[in-house]
Amino acid sequence: MRTQSMAIEIKNPREIEAIRISSQMAADTLLLVGEKLRAGMTTEEINTIVHEDTIRRGAIPSPLNYHGYPKSVCTSVNEVVCHGIPGPQVIHDGDIINVDVTTFYGGFHGDTSATFYVGKPSNDARHVTEVARKSLELGIEQVREGARIGDIGAAIQEYAEGQGCSVVEQFVGHGIGRRFHEPPQVPHFGKRGTKDRMRAGMVFTIEPMINLGGWEVEVMDDNWTALTKDRSLSAQFEHTIVVTRNGCEILTKRSRALMNSEIVPSLLM
Ligand code: MF3
Ligand code: CO
Ligand code: CO
């Protein structure tokens, strides 16, 4: 029944443990990408790193063949908002690139992404990236049993717009579990006290896409690559989280800091 398939699942502890395992695999693969990332690489090489690391774990890269998506990861450079398809594109010193890893293992998906600095970023690149990083953190801080889904987007929008950036509306966070995308939708904009109430055991992503210019997005002729309409820079971070009684657990929490994002060698020079 439609009403049944629309309902937000409450995961039991066994299901949450399974999502924790696939989420930790995704987090570890993202750490590996951060260590290997270099100016002069192609996005195809990043795809190979993610694909091979995922297979080595006995897992499957969720993006591959998902609604016809042709690759194992999304690589979104500079003005690309999300769903960039790996290929011959070379990444250059000064670029920013979001790498979005989703891992399917034991029947469950885990989804996480980060924006990396390729070499030394411009002030604009640093600004939009750090606003996106903080937006995710502030969104996560809203999560607890009894809070509303709308509280997440309100916190993000208020902060990001206050920093002179804009929030993408066309793509949202999502429930995740046996399916890559399931209810609820988690917008990164909106009003406090609106939308569904969060319940312990709900598992969803928060993945704000923040633009330096306007919020409008267009999708390229490949039907995947989304870019800012004004071609301004865009950055994104994503975690998979589970709602708990007094907050949440970040299932894709990293075991160490992310090279070329949370640790930037070029900024220390
Ligand atoms: N990982 C993306 C998300 O965060 C979805 C990518 S769908 C794909 O929801 F087909 F492009 F991989
Ligand atoms: Co996602
Ligand atoms: Co993702």
Image (cartoon, rainbow, N blue to C red):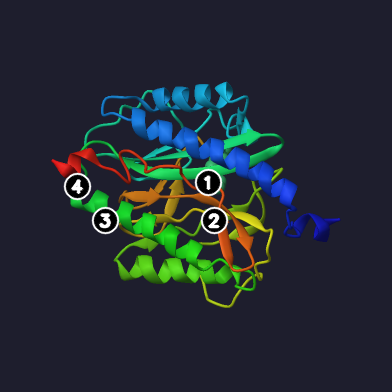
Say which element carries label 1.
Answer: loop
| Callout in the foreground (1, 2) | 1
Q: Distance from label 1 to label 3 (Cα)? A: 24 Å
Residue marked by disc 4? 122
| Callout in the foreground (2, 3) | 3
Q: Distance from label 4 to label 2 (Cα)? A: 27 Å
Q: Which corner quadrant of the image does residue 244 belong to? A: bottom right
- The three-letter amino acid code for the residue at tag 4 is Ser
Q: Distance from label 1 to label 2 (Cα)? A: 18 Å
Q: Residue at x 51, y 50 (%)?
A: 239
**How busy is the neighbourhood of tag 3: few (under 14 within 10 Å), some, or many (20 plus)?**
some
Residue marked by disc 2? 172
Say which element carries label 3.
Answer: helix
Do labels 4 and 3 touch, CB within 8 Å? Answer: no
Residue 204 horizontal/vertical position (percent): 61, 54
Residue marked by disc 3? 127
Q: Residue at x 30, y 31 (%)?
A: 91
Q: Distance from label 4 to label 3 (Cα)? A: 9 Å
Q: Distance from label 2 to label 3 (Cα)? A: 22 Å
Do labels 4 and 2 touch, CB within 8 Å? Answer: no
Residue marked by disc 1? 252
Mark toward the start of the polypeptide (1 vs 4): 4
Residue 128 horizontal/vertical position (percent): 30, 54
Do labels 1 and 4 touch, CB within 8 Å? Answer: no
Q: Is mark 4 within 8 Å of ligand 3?
A: no
**How busy is the neighbourhood of tag 2: few (under 14 within 10 Å), some, or many (20 plus)?**
some
* Above or below, comparing residue 122 to residue 119 in the picture: below
